[in-house]
């Protein structure tokens, strides 16, 4: 059953507060669901404009305030619970959110990874407790036990200071980091022999809600740290950025059966709509004149001279981008293939325009002799179009955004042309192995490996864990307020939120 967002928001305002814990619109373990749109790249979402949110996330409840220092999620009154959900999914990946939790007794700020069959990975922050952050997970919506929440010290007060909360998620293990400190590691087998290990494509959800609302169950209120006093608000969580890295690639993730097992998930090859949207939003639309003035003067001379044609020069300039990226380090060798591809296309258009203006153009002879090399591939250096001396230049065209981050795996498996255009590096290194399906990139160097603490280790596992006094009517920490739909619900039905 799906209700319209406006109806839900309206209902929430009237009947408030309405909290589903976490929800899915279609559970693939029970029915045939649409494929999950893939992110397929790594991207740093800087939450300093509304576009960052509206281009890539759905606002599933409430409204946000956008500032240059971050996006604010505020509870002004009973029933408020602004929440967003990514329009895309990641299938293994890492998520680093730089945020400041809200203060306020009973107020819960949260970062959640949630899949269609209710696999879940959580960060939760109790507004009454600025010293600790809660980590948690669920598999296949299994809420039969509440012993998985573990609290870790967050360093300085997490309501006063921005911290970087990272989840690093592979088929081998789940890791939670606070800033660069690894605090928790959950090996696959530790989650009910892997069966309840989060392992299916995830959306990223950010939001705030009042666990301490008087209409919630006692267990929820107790877990949240007590009743919320709305008169002491507003209570605001601020998100500065979210670096989201999808370790798989493709256009979508398909559930091929109802097991909920990662091995049943198939990555469909193709272009990621989410990635294209991001690239498009971040690509400045330069006029032809600007592009022309951005060209290195030597290039202009070459174009004026008509040698080699504008296509070769412009595309060579694109190739330099790759070289420059390589200098910046191996990490960047896979730099944003989608963007390069788009710019490659633009370069074609530009050279056609330039030709019309008599500034150079298509070198048909070169194309016939050299095939694709004439179209901007790296080609064989002995036959390269790159004039001598260019390699040391720092061309100013085109600039990639500095917040574009780079994947560890090739992101365009289906496009030989792309592999080609970034191949200057791969020529000298191991060839790409193209395998878009489940992988666990072990190469990720996230931080303090030495400080590893195994799951259920030294930290607090209190909260609602072992307390049998209230575990019966206790709703597991309900991560999210009601968004687009409430089926199926989790946890006991008497736990204080309403069912539509
Ligand atoms: C699956 O569908 C059946 C029949 O509609 C329903 O009874 C059951 O509760 C559903 N299970 C889940 C996990 O959604
Ligand atoms: C948002 O952040 C990006 C990346 O840091 C920056 O380039 C851009 O100028 C910022 N925009 C605003 C409106 O602050
Ligand atoms: C952004 O943060 C800086 C440093 O904390 C502060 O000085 C500035 O006033 C903030 N700007 C806004 C619009 O809140
Ligand atoms: C985001 O909203 C659109 C429009 O309502 C919907 O089609 C899409 O399924 C939503 N995405 C997610 C991941 O919920
Ligand atoms: C914050 O939470 C931790 C872990 O549950 C707990 O040890 C600590 O006493 C709490 N602090 C306050 C002020 O409640
Ligand atoms: C849920 O997990 C518990 C272990 O935490 C396990 O005993 C139980 O069988 C699981 N339930 C389902 C439906 O998988
Ligand atoms: C956040 O932490 C992760 C893991 O330590 C790190 O890779 C990432 O660069 C950090 N992000 C920021 C903005 O500091
Ligand atoms: C919740 O706690 C209050 C006060 O302690 C008590 O009066 C009420 O009966 C409790 N409700 C439930 C459902 O346990
Ligand atoms: C991916 O995008 C490129 C260029 O935008 C296009 O040529 C190609 O056909 C697309 N591939 C698919 C599978 O849609």
Image (cartoon, rainbow, N blue to C red):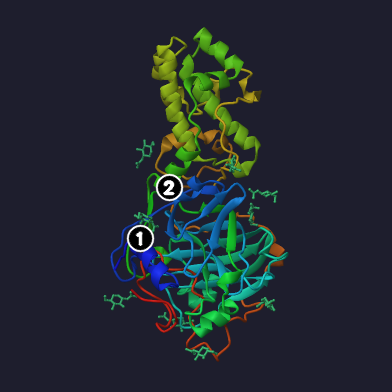
Residue 25 relative to residue 134: left or right? left
Residue 130 relative to residue 354: left or right? right
Image quadrant containing the C terminus:
bottom left
Q: Quadrant of ligand 5?
A: bottom right
User: Residue at point 57% right, 75% down?
Assistant: 228
Residue at far bottom of view: 469
Residue 394, x across and y down, in percent: 64, 26
- Residue 366 appears in the rendering: no
Disc 1 element = helix
| Above/below status of 57 relative to 135 | above
Residue at far front of view: 231
Image quadrant containing the N terminus:
bottom left
Q: Which residue is mark 1?
A: 6
Label 2: few (<14), some or many (≥20) within 10 Å?
many
User: Residue at point 43% right, 34% down?
Assistant: 417
Residue 288, x across and y down, in percent: 48, 21
Residue 136, x across and y down, in percent: 55, 72
User: Residue at point 46% right, 25% down?
Assistant: 347
Q: Quadrant of residue 179?
A: bottom right
Q: Nearer the viewer, residue 77 or 108?
A: 77
Disc 2 element = helix
Q: Nearer the viewer, residue 456 or 292?
A: 292
Q: Which residue is mark 2?
A: 274
User: Residue at point 43% right, 43% down?
Assistant: 277
Residue 313, x across and y down, in percent: 52, 19
Separation of residues labelled 2 and 1 (CA atoms): 24 Å
Q: Quadrant of residue 430?
A: top right
């Amino acid at each position: 059953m799906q209700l319209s967002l406006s109806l839900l928001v309206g209902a929430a305002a009237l009947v408030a507060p309405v909290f589903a814990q976490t929800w899915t619109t279609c559970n693939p373990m029970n029915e045939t669901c649409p494929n999950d749109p893939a992110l397929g790249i790594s991207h740093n979402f800087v939450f300093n404009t509304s576009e960052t949110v509206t281009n890539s996330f759905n606002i599933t409840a409430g409204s946000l305030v956008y500032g240059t220092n971050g996006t604010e999620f505020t509870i002004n009154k009973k029933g408020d619970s602004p929440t967003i959900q990514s329009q895309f999914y990641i299938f293994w990946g890492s998520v680093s959110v730089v945020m400041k939790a809200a203060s306020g007794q009973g107020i819960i700020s949260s970062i959640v990874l949630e899949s269609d069959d209710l696999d879940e990975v959580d960060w939760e922050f109790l507004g009454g407790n600025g010293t600790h952050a809660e980590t948690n997970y669920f598999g296949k919506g299994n809420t039969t036990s509440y012993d998985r929440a573990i609290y870790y010290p967050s360093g300085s007060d997490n309501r006063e200071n921005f911290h970087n909360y990272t989840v690093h998620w592979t088929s081998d293990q789940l890791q939670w980091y606070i800033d660069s400190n690894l605090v928790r590691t959950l090996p696959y087998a530790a989650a009910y022999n892997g069966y309840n290990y989060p392992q299916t494509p995830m959306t990223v959800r950010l939001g705030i809600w009042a666990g301490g609302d008087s209409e919630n169950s006692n267990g929820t209120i107790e877990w949240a740290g007590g009743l919320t006093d709305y008169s002491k608000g507003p209570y605001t969580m601020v998100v500065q950025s979210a670096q989201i890295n999808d370790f798989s690639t493709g256009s979508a993730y398909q559930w091929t059966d109802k097991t909920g097992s990662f091995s049943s998930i198939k990555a469909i090859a193709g272009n990621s709509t989410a990635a294209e949207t991001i690239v498009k939003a971040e690509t400045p639309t330069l006029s032809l004149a600007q592009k022309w003035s951005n060209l290195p003067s030597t290039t202009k001379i070459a174009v004026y001279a008509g040698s080699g044609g504008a296509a070769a020069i412009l595309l060579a300039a694109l190739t330099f981008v790759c070289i420059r990226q390589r200098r910046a380090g191996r990490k960047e060798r896979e730099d944003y293939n989608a963007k390069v591809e788009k710019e490659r296309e633009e370069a074609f258009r530009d050279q056609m325009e330039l030709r019309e203006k008599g500034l150079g153009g298509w070198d048909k002879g070169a194309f016939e002799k050299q095939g694709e090399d004439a179209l901007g591939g790296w080609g064989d250096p002995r036959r390269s179009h790159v004039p001598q001396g260019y390699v040391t230049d720092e061309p100013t065209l085109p600039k990639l955004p500095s917040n574009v981050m780079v994947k560890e795996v090739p992101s365009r498996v289906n496009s030989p042309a792309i592999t080609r255009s970034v191949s200057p590096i791969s020529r000298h290194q191991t060839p790409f192995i193209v395998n878009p399906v489940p992988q666990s990139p072990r190469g990720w160097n996230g931080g303090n490996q030495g400080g590893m603490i195994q799951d259920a280790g030294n930290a607090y596992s209190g909260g609602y864990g072992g307390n049998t006094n209230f575990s019966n009517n206790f709703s597991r920490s309900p991560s999210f307020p009601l968004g687009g739909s409430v089926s199926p619900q989790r946890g006991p039905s008497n736990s204080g939120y309403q069912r539509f």
